[in-house]
Amino acid sequence: MCGIVGYIGRQEAYPIIISGLKRLEYRGYDSAGISIANPSPTTVKCRGRVRDLEQKVGAPLHGSLGIGHTRWATHGEPNDGNAHPHTSQHGKFTLVHNGIIENYASLKLRLEKRGYTFVSETDTEVLVNLIEYIYMKGDVNPEVAVRLALTKVVGAYGLAIIAHDTPDRLIAARKGSPLVIGVGDGEFFVASDSTPIVEYTNRVIFLNDNDVAILGRNQMVLKTVHNDLLEPNIQQIDLDIEAIEKGGFDHFMLKEIFEQPRSIHDTFRGRLSAEYDIHLGGLLEHIPALKSAHRIIFVACGTSWHAAQMGKYLIEDLAQIAVEVEYASEFRYRNPVLRHNDVVMAISQSGETADTLAAIKLAKSKGALVLGICNVVGSSIARETVAGVYTHAGPEIGVASTKAFTAQVTVLIMMAILLAKKRRTISEEARRELVGELMLVPSKIERILELNPQVLKISKRFAQASNFLYLGRGCNFPVALEGALKLKEISYIHAEGYPAAEMKHGPIALIDETMPVVVIAIKDHSYDKIVSNIQEVKARKGIIIAIVTEGDTTIKSMADHVREIPASSEVVAGLLTVIPLQLLAYHIALLRGCNVDQPRNLAKSVTVE
Ligand code: G6P
């Protein structure tokens, strides 16, 4: 939540920061602001998007040192005053912050007693004034003031700070919220992730918790908040600028839906051999532990939690290992029981979700082996876990996750087949057949994407519905959950996903002639059961939109709308059935005039609990 950008160098900072903020808008987009030092900082901020900020600024600000922010409100509603950057009362420091200062209320009281007054409702304004107070009272240099203040703070922060008395320095600090430094030639960039940086340099440093970087144009000092010098670990990142642009699509979400044949291929590329063997290099060392695990416990949030549910069905079915799926936010606070041979596995697109990160730390503190499935290379979760698998889906910018989900499921399918082989719970023939099925998924998705105009047609029919029900069984139950989540998060229509049979225990009461019910009814082992569920809905005059296997005539004769997808093994079917549901949510949201890529109140990366 919240994106921050900073620049110090020889170029004009303003365009670099504005374009960086636009790349980070997926992290938050309720207000935006910028400060450019020349040499003293000019700050402009407002409620709204980065383009509103540009309008407010008018002619570009000049200067080669600056910071910027795009906000997802935690403390204080989105308005001009609460927007960042925040400047301290006596004008000594200006900063942008991503995270939450949990003890801000007590710090604020102490500062008020010392004569400070506050103009915003934010925790960040407390922090900037605390730094200033220490600077002025302690007669120390700005860097020391920042470090001392940070030792007094409880909570999470990614910070970029301008000290007005040293306008040739940019200070950055991290704890809990991600921060990347781009190392250029006579210039440094600071950003919440590497997308604003890759245009200029592929040399980056991922800051660790408690790191503070003091950046001049030609030098960088990296130390801990406790003043221990650190050796910067500069890494080369391989991020293609085209991957973070819309590439001719109207929205990132649509681009990412259409990218799935490629992104799934990228997820299994190099991991499936011509002999149909599966290699997950990151897990190699831990296969014995996984193979003999008493339980695998997935911890995740949101869409990643749905992928984990799919993983449970697959791993239990194929490899016969007990799997539990936990909401990271619940797991972290409920003193879970972990046995010595339980393996905890975190699943996260961003690798920065605060609750998932905290769940990992808790599991580690209880002595568990903690592995990860992550999309963002070098992210906090990737670094906090002992080992894991990168999904290689490429940057996902649309707030509603699409290609990251199918990449996670692809990894889980590979893991399930691999563990099944190791545990001898699958025949060689069946195993080869499943790997072959997985290889065919990208081309089958290509065919499903051709249904886009047909999905648009259905979307027009139901764009004004107020409720939706999604039903599925087995591996398609998590797909029903995911379909409902996609719809509600971007179109604001109330939607629920349910295991089809469980409908009788509640949701059936909602069904009448106005209720669209999306049923995933492909030919699998529960086909007959789902046909009965469709009849139950029809008997109550509900409207059935069914996703069926090509050539199915039975359901066609009962359902109101049918979309056919290619036949496949049940194991990979979720990768196919989810695609029409993503498209349905996309079109309905668009038809309702919603902001598809940046839905209200949501953020791509939830770095606060
Ligand atoms: C947010 C995003 C979702 C995502 C969830 C978990 O809610 O909007 O798309 O599924 O966080 O994020 P993660 O990065 O951990 O997968």
Image (spheres, rainbow, N blue to C red):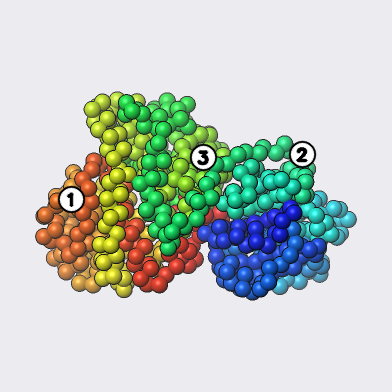
Question: Which residue is labeled 2 in the image?
Answer: 229
Q: Which mark is residue 70?
A: none
Residue type at mark 2?
Leu
Q: Give me the residue at 31% from left, 38% from top.
A: 439
Residue 484: percent from left, percent from top: 34, 60
| Above or below, comparing residue 529 to residue 78 in the picture | above
Q: Give me the residue at 28% from left, 70% from top.
A: 460
Residue 477: percent from left, percent from top: 29, 51
User: Is residue 240 visible in the rendered structure shown here?
Assistant: yes
Q: Secondary structure at mark 2?
A: loop
Residue type at mark 1?
Glu
Q: Give me the residue at 16% from left, 67% from top.
A: 540
- Whole-angstrom CA distance, mark 3 to mark 2, is 30 Å
In front of the other: 15 or 560: 15
Residue 239: percent from left, percent from top: 54, 45
Is the residue marked by circle 3 packed among few (<14), some (14-19), or many (20+) residues within 10 Å?
Answer: many
Question: Which residue is labeled 1 in the image?
Answer: 550
Q: Give me the residue at 35% from left, 71% from top.
A: 591
